[in-house]
Image (cartoon, rainbow, N blue to C red):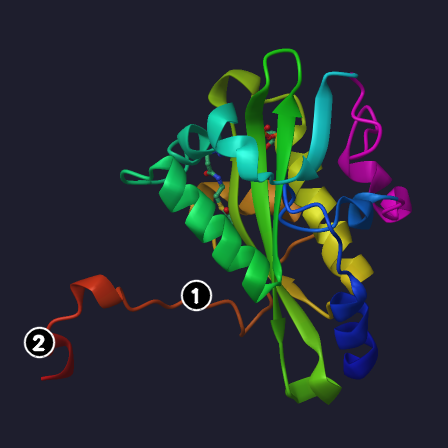
Amino acid sequence: MGNTCSSKVLQHTFDDDQYLYDPSLLKNLDWSQTKSCLNPEITNENTGESWIVVRPLKLSDYDRGYVQILSQLTSVGNVSKSDFENQFSNMRKAGGYYVTVIEDTRNNTIIGSSTLITEFKFIHDCALRARLEDVVVNNTYRGKQLGKLIVLTVTLLARKLGCYKMTLDCKDNLVSFYRTLGYNSEPGNANSMKLRLEQLGSSVYE
Ligand SMILES: CC(=O)SCCNC(=O)CCNC(=O)[C@H](O)C(C)(C)COP(=O)(O)OP(=O)(O)OC[C@H]1O[C@@H](n2cnc3c(N)ncnc32)[C@H](O)[C@@H]1OP(=O)(O)O
């Protein structure tokens, strides 16, 4: 399984350096299993409104408010346009970063985002696994299923890429949100642990 997955990922080279990843990967995702999650049923290709567009992050999205929307998720700091472009280039070169956004094309603004990160493993026959990161919807657009849409889009993309599992960390109040989208805490295997390296002092190991 793993070798097939890896070659699938590596095959996706493309020329348009505006995009972080190949936009054709978002075509024909299999929404058949997720119908009960959305009412009315929408998909990344049929969002219900012509002005709601789901696509990979673009180099020019700095000017569409991408960094501002991230500030509704957590502290972003001072990210200049060149900082953004440099990090975009780092992600594109590294591969495996599928930052996916929702744009309101009426005002050229990014109104939602989520990131799929894939990771090559040696285990499980050299499998590919997935992580969900940095999910956010602009607060004036919340409650309209856009959060579900953007999470399900990258979840189905992970499946299309051949990932065998996808995990996320979230605050307690969002557990029910992710449950409605098929994510679960596995009994006996539901601990999320972290060490904040930027705050690491010698006292941690004394
Ligand atoms: C892996 C991670 O990145 S975790 C970080 C998640 N992101 C954040 O916390 C950033 C701030 N929050 C947000 O951007 C948004 O509130 C999101 C992305 C969580 C949800 O976006 P929305 O577009 O409002 O979600 P959507 O309309 O698709 O779904 C709404 C459902 O989620 C539930 N929900 C949404 N936000 C919350 C919340 N903060 N607490 C509890 N429930 C919530 C709603 O009650 C609703 O439930 P229903 O369908 O049963 O009525």
Residue at image location 56% in from the left, 26% down from the top: 110
Q: Quadrant of the N terminus?
A: bottom right
Q: Which secondary structure type mostly characterizes the magenta part of the structure?
A: loop
Residue drawn at x 55%, y 33% is: 60
Magenta-highlighted residues? 28-49
Q: Is residue 173 left or right of residue 156?
A: left
Residue 94 shown in magenta: no
Residue 17 shown left or right of residue 139 in the figure: right
Could you tell me how far apart the alpha carbons at marks 1 and 2 are, in whole angstroms?
22 Å
Q: Give the labeled residue for mark 1.
A: 192
**Lower sequence index among marks 1 and 2:** 1
Q: Is residue 180 visible?
A: no
Q: Which residue position is annotated with label 2?
A: 203
Q: Position of residue 33 (x, y in %)?
A: 87, 48
Q: Name the quadrant where ligand 1 sits.
A: top right
Q: Position of residue 83 (x, y in %)?
A: 37, 45
Assign the C terminus to one quadrant of the image.
Answer: bottom left
